[in-house]
Image: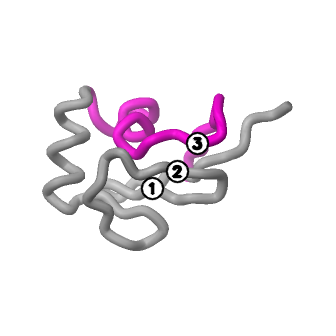
Amino acid sequence: MEELILKDEFIKLGQALKACGLVESGAESKQVILDGLVTVNGETQLQRGKKLYPKDVVSYQGKSIRIKEHDH
C-alpha cells in the first residue's frame, strides 16, 4: 500500500487522488468520485471535498493509499 504524507492537517479526496497519480486531472477525479468508484475506509465516497486525515485509506481501481501524518 502506498502512502501519501500530509503537508497540512488534512487533504481533500479529489486532491489526494491527483497527488497520488491515480487520476490525471481534477475533472477526472470529480468524475470517478461521482461514479461511485472511490472508497474511503471501505465505504463508497461521493464527495470530492471529503477531508482525509491520517490513517484514512483511499481505494480506486484496485490501488489503496494510506494517508499519513507529516513528519514534524
Q: Which residue is mark 3?
A: 10
What amino acid does circle 3 point to? Phe
Tell me what residue is drawn at x 33 percent, y 54 percent.
60
The reply to whether dot 3 and dot 1 touch (C-beta < 8 Å) is no
Q: Quadrant of the C terminus?
A: top right
Toward the viewer: 65 or 53?
53
Tell me what residue is drawn at x 60 percent, y 51 percent.
53
Toward the viewer: 16 or 50?
50
Mark number displayed over residue 58: 1
Choose the circle earlier in sequence order: 3 or 1. Answer: 3
Choose the circle earlier in sequence order: 2 or 3. Answer: 3
Looking at the image, residue 64 sits to the left or right of residue 38; the answer is right
Mark 3: few/some/many CA within 10 Å (<14, 14-19, 20+):
some
The reply to whether dot 2 and dot 3 touch (C-beta < 8 Å) is yes
Q: Position of residue 45 (x, y in %)?
A: 32, 62
Tell me what residue is drawn at x 21 percent, y 42 percent.
30
**Nearer the observer, disc 2 or disc 1?**
2
Instruction: Say whether residue 18 is magenta.
Output: yes
Q: Position of residue 42 (x, y in %)?
A: 43, 72
Q: Position of residue 27 (x, y in %)?
A: 18, 32
Looking at the image, residue 51 sits to the left or right of residue 68; the answer is left
The reply to whether dot 2 and dot 1 touch (C-beta < 8 Å) is yes
Q: Tell me the element at label 3.
A: loop
How many numbered badges does the structure rendering display? 3
Mark number displayed over residue 52: 2
Query: Against 42, is 56 above or below?
Result: above
Q: Which residues are magenta?
A: 1-24
Toward the viewer: 26 or 49?
49
Measure the alpha-carbon separation of dots 2 and 1. 9 Å
What amino acid does circle 1 point to? Val
